Image: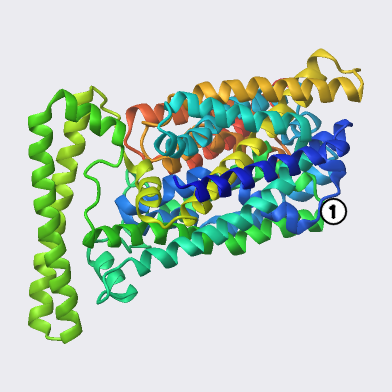
Amino acid sequence: MHELDWLIVITYLVYVVWHALRMTRNAQTTEGYFLAERALPWWAVGLSVMATQMSAITLVGTTGQAYDDGMRFIQFYYGLPLAMIILCVTAVPFFYRAKVFTAYEYLEQRFDAKTRTLTSFFFLVSRGLAVGVIIAAPSVILSIVLGWNEIITIFVIGLSTTVYTMVGGVQAVTWTDVKQMAIIIIGLGICAVLIVKGFPPDVSLADGLRLAGISGKLTTIDTSFDLSEPYTIWTGLFGAVFLFLSYFGCDQSQVQRYLSAKSINEGRTSLLMSAVLKIPIQFLILLIGVLVFVFYQFQTPPMIFNDVDASRAAISQPVEYQRLESDFRDVHEARDLAARAFISATHVGAIEEINATRANYTLANETFATTRKNAIDFIKSSNGNESFSDVNYVFPMFVITRMPIGVVGLIIAAIMAAAMSSVAAELNALATASTIDFYKRHIRPSATDRQYVAFGKAATLLWGIFACIAATFATNLGSLIVVVNKFGSFFYGSLLGVFVLAFAVPAARSLGAFSGLLLGIASVWIASTFTDIAFLWFNLLGCLITVASGYLISLLARKDVA
């Protein structure tokens, strides 16, 4: 990067860390360190809710997902407003009035200690793995920018974030989230404008979107009913609703946000803020990925966006790699000519010519996609890595090679800020659950505030190290935005089922909740192992099995007692 880009990145990161460390004066008590004295305003909590979810995975993984697969991923979020409304009526008042530190603490009040401990344990496992993926996303970028080994980059990002999270607590995390949301929105807006300006002079935004449309990149509603297809209107309105209900209603990283609000109403308003703003912001991020696809219709894209793996394959099998590169350039030139011919035809307006050039472009684009797939398959076989995917490298490579000086630094700073803030929020939630649900509940129930805060800081450090180790396995698992939601989907639906039993089933008993949770997670494992059901349906399946089995076991337990 240019010196100006480095100056922007370093200045912003120094400011973020400095600002977070200023919050330490309010983090000396248990309630101050873990819940910011329950005194944060709704707008700060709302921005923190969105920022915690909008990690570097969103900027890196989602844009790459859109480049590869188009806008279909937006359907994932269609159920979000409904989920937020339900949680405003149920989870927010239940948790806030219970005066709990963690969502799982409430389950002991409703059921018993073992149910609380089991649900908290599953949260720790699922989010501990997920935060590793969140660290992996920006590590992809810095490994490209700096030429560093990815593992070194992972530990630099993860441990530097761990340090300020240890010191500042939830208040530092929340106010850092507010700052990073501003730079993300500014960076994305500038990026979108500059991509369009990079189109050829005779190609407008409308022309570009027309190309994207006939390439299948603008599909935002898919009404087909196929349980193996992850992104349809049905998975968004049913499967994803259960994911969002669980994530925002049962996941400590989100519950902790609105537990720190000044009142129940302010906690509700913070969630409604996400209900209103999340889909438009996600649409913009996906659109940027589609615009990058359009940009590369007229500029030669890398055959493989991951330079490291491409170079390794080129060295091991140079003749075959050069042949693939030659074929790739040829099919790109053919697609470029076909795209320009189609756009010229649309400007003239002759129906026959439009249809003919459209057919030619469609064929050229399919040939290009096949050639790129062949190249990826070659990388997999050459490097012995069947899980290889370069989708997470698309956006960072585009930014580094195509954006002007200064803007590169701004975008990198936005991605870094998103990563650090999300990682900080997750680590703080993991430390809170570890301290309150395990250390305080089972080990030192009568310790002082000072001891609980000290343990929380130590837990933050340990979880930071664990997340860094998990991140080393995440970068080649495919689209990171998909990976992190797959991790969650193995647990989220079943955890949600326990809270449904707690909130809405008066007859539910502790044995039913505990057993139902285990059966729910077992059912998800069975479905993932022996069926082709898309991962978003795991949330619905886990919840239904947990509620149904928990209710039946509760009834049987009552009969035995009677």
Drawn side of residue 529 relative to residue 310, left or right: right
Q: Which residue is mark 1?
A: 263
Residue 292 location (% of width, % of height): 33, 58
The image quadrant of residue 378 is: top left
Q: Residue at x 53, y 45 (%)?
A: 6
Quadrant of the drawing holding the N terminus: top left
Q: Is residue 177 above or below residue 117?
A: below
The image quadrant of residue 304 is: top left
Q: Is residue 426 above or below residue 364?
A: above
Q: Residue at x 13, y 73 (%)?
A: 341
Residue 530 location (% of width, % of height): 33, 28
Q: Is residue 275 above or below residue 251?
A: below
What amino acid type should be assigned to the residue bearing mark 1? Ser
Drawn side of residue 241 relative to residue 368, left or right: right
Q: Nearer the viewer, residue 490 or 336?
A: 336
Residue 126 visible? The answer is no
Residue 501 location (% of width, % of height): 67, 38
